[in-house]
Image: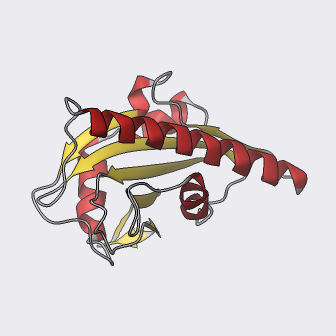
Amino acid sequence: KHLAGRTVVVSVFASDTGTHWDFSRDKDVERYSICYHDLRMACEWLTEKAASYGVKTEFVWDWLAHFDLYYEHRFDRHMVVYPSDYSVYWEYINSSIPTDELLCRYDADNILYIFHYRTPKKNDVGSHAFPFGELDDDVCGFECVAMFSGLFTDVATPGTYAHEMLHL
């Protein structure tokens, strides 16, 4: 997959046995807003930079405008680790999110899933991207990012989002 063309970005606000989102708490609503802002900035920056190299790219990412790009999920295991158990992500996406329908609906060339975790400040695991190619003899056809709130900080930054998205 490449950044060229139209890329659908699906956001999954993920919880696990060690982290969780609670949108009744102001702090989590604030972090949610920061994720939205930082993803927007990363998409705009990547689009602008790609254009400066003569590459046309577009991101369909705005989960407020496109409700089918927003999900919440709780994993029943600890997921804030590196390397991640990629098969758990694959199983969730394959069983819960209509990848082919989203690609068709948005006339997209690529799809990227970002799993946003609300990790504590003491988190020492960095965000990371992982492409899915062949896994257990099944072809997956999408890219994922495990986006942790930050590495020794409260929040990730637009630069972190852009960095991980460049792995496409």
* Quarter occupied by the N terminus: bottom right
Q: Is residue 81 above or below residue 53?
A: below
Whole-percent x and y of residue 59?
63, 40
Whole-percent x and y of residue 122?
28, 69
Q: Locate residue 39 relative to residue 91 in the image: left or right.
A: right
Report the front residue among 13 and 108: 13
Report the front residue among 97 and 41: 41
Task: Report the label total.
Answer: 0
Residue at 51 percent of width and 43 percent of height: 9
Residue at 42 percent of width and 54 percent of height: 155
Q: Locate residue 161 relative to residue 148 in the image: left or right.
A: right
Residue at 46 percent of width and 56 percent of height: 156
Whole-percent x and y of residue 167?
58, 66
Q: Is residue 140 above or below residue 10?
A: below
Report the front residue among 7 and 129: 129
* Residue with the most extreme top position: 65
Q: Locate residue 142 relative to residue 119 in the image: left or right.
A: right
The answer to which image quadrant residue 101 occupies is: top left
Report the front residue among 9 and 22: 22
Q: Locate residue 55 relative to residue 105 in the image: left or right.
A: right
Whole-percent x and y of residue 131?
47, 67
Residue 92 visible in the current orientation: yes
Residue 54 visible in the current orientation: no
* Quarter occupied by the C terminus: bottom right
Residue at 60 percent of width and 63 percent of height: 163
The answer to which image quadrant residue 12 occupies is: top left
The colour style of the image is: secondary structure
The answer to which image quadrant residue 108 occupies is: top right
Q: Is residue 79 above or below residue 64?
A: below
